[in-house]
């Protein structure tokens, strides 16, 4: 009945699985039949400190009873506190603009770049170079920024000024006197959990600095300790001009941030958001950062990352006929599967074993568990994954 209701009234833009989840805790989610699933997806890298995290839930409840929203025309205390926390923890000399999603954060990044490229009100430089296999969002301009032609079939005409490079090394040859920005993911999430090579990224960053071209790093998926540091940019030891953040920051409340070293790029009226950075979401996100920073400092995060990687290496060893290689960084991981057919079977088998996993490009079985996943939850998840793999041989 619920299924029929959904199908009748909600647009069919997702290949939706009609399981009905009712509650969750940590890395476990229960359906309306009482079955417990192990969640190796955290809602696509969103629920970073685990489902129903007590500190985050308490902060949300407390704030909801006091004040949720006044508009950005007034000072918003938790927004200022979150901005300070993000900037100070990042080590970058930046300011923040608050939006509601990853795509919106990237829209903000593109607007910053376009304004930076203006001279006397004229768009002298406006081109943004992105990578093939990238993913930057679903709005018209972030869709165009996304370097996957298959996603540009409908919805045109798109805004001009997006150029796609095959690889990081290919970027230099595409730069011309209209180029203002390069936007990249350091680990392509949707594109197959493919980390870029550190030396190449550093070389690119240096080149862009010399040419006064902005480097925007889309950390919507890699950010908020997903790869082990607050930002993957910290791990790669680069200094981007723009960083975008979203998924893992709010533990499920919708939030997006664009951070930039161009502290005075916007004047009142240049950019805005009705909901962006309101009391509720910024209170929650502040709590998420506090939890993750102390978890990182305790060594717990690094331990889990190492363990998760080791367990996946075990699968590569045992299933060479199914797995090509293990990819990813930190708790953003994937197993490259030898065919799309096998990948689909594995995802289905895992679901039957009550394990939630994801797919990504290049036939990748993708894992984005909550960063605070326990050893017991990991072991239970991998036991189920083992069964899912064993079943492919049946
Ligand atoms: C998910 C994602 C986006 C889009 O975020 P939304 O919140 O869905 O708009 C953009 N960039 C990257 C790298 C992502 O993984």
Image (cartoon, rainbow, N blue to C red):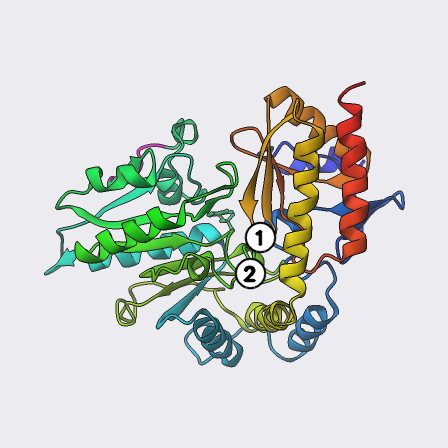
Q: Are marks 1 and 2 in contact (CB under 8 Å)?
A: yes
- Residue neighbourhood size for the residue with mark 2, other residues' Cα within 10 Å, grouped as few (<14), some (14–19), many (≥20): many
The structure residue drawn at horizontal position 35% and vertical position 43%, both measured from the top left corner, is 141
Q: Which residues are magenta?
A: 156-160
Q: Is residue 84 visible?
A: yes
The structure residue drawn at horizontal position 68% and vertical position 69%, both measured from the top left corner, is 56
The spot of residue 265 in percent (x, y) is: 26, 67
Callout 1 secondary element: loop
User: Nearest the camera: 76 or 149?
Assistant: 149
Residue 254 lies left or right of residue 239; in this view the side is: right
The spot of residue 64 in percent (x, y) is: 66, 73
From the Cβ of disc 2, is ligand 1 less than 8 Å away? no
Location of mark 2 (residue): 225
The structure residue drawn at horizontal position 54% and vertical position 55%, both measured from the top left corner, is 227
Residue 166 covered by magenta stretch? no
Q: Is residue 41 visible?
A: no
- Residue neighbourhood size for the residue with mark 1, other residues' Cα within 10 Å, grouped as few (<14), some (14–19), many (≥20): many
Location of mark 1 (residue): 330
The spot of residue 174 in percent (x, y) is: 21, 38
Magenta stretch prevailing secondary structure:
loop
Give the residue at the far front of this rendering: 317
Residue 21 lies left or right of residue 225; in this view the side is: right
Q: Mark 1 or mark 2, which is nearer to you? A: 1
The spot of residue 169 in percent (x, y) is: 29, 39
User: Nearest the camera: 50 or 334?
Assistant: 334
Give the residue at the far right of this rendering: 34
């Amino acid at each position: 009945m619920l299924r029929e209701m959904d199908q009748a009234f909600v647009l069919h833009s997702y290949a939706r699985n009609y399981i009905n989840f009712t509650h969750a805790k940590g890395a476990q989610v229960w359906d309306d039949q009482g079955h417990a699933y192990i969640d190796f997806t955290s809602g696509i890298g969103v629920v970073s400190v685990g489902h129903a995290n007590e500190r985050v839930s308490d902060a949300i409840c407390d704030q909801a009873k006091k004040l949720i929203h006044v508009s950005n025309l007034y000072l918003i205390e938790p927004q200022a506190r979150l901005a300070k926390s993000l900037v100070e923890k990042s080590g970058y000399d930046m300011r923040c603009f608050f939006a509601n999603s990853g795509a919106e954060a990237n829209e903000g990044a593109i607007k910053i770049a376009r304004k930076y490229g203006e001279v006397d009100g004229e768009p002298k430089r406006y081109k943004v170079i992105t990578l093939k296999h990238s993913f930057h969002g679903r709005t018209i301009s972030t869709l165009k920024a996304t370097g996957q032609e298959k996603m540009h079939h409908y919805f045109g005409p798109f805004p001009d000024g997006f150029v796609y490079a095959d690889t990081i090394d290919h970027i230099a040859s595409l730069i011309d006197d209209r180029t203002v920005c390069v936007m990249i993911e350091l680990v392509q999430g949707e594109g197959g959990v493919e980390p870029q090579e550190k030396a190449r990224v550093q070389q690119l960053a240096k080149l862009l600095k010399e040419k006064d071209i902005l480097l925007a790093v889309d950390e919507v998926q890699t950010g908020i300790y997903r790869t082990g540091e607050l930002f993957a940019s910290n791990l790669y030891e680069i200094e981007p001009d723009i960083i975008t953040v979203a998924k893992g920051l709010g533990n499920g409340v919708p939030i997006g941030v664009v951070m930039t070293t161009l502290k005075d790029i916007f004047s009142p009226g240049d950019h805005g958001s009705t909901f962006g950075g309101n009391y509720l979401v910024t209170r929650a996100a502040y709590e998420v950062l506090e939890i993750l920073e102390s978890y990182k400092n305790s060594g717990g995060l690094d331990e889990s990352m190492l363990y998760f990687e080791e367990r996946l290496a075990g699968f590569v060893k045992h299933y060479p006929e199914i797995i090509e290689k293990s990819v990813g960084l930190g708790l953003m991981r994937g197993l490259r599967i030898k065919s799309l057919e096998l990948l689909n079977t594995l995802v289905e088998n895992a679901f039957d074993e009550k394990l939630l996993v994801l797919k990504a490009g290049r036939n990748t079985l993708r894992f984005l568990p909550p960063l605070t996943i326990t050893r017991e939850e990991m072991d239970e998840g991998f036991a189920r994954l083992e069964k899912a793999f064993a079943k492919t041989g049946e």
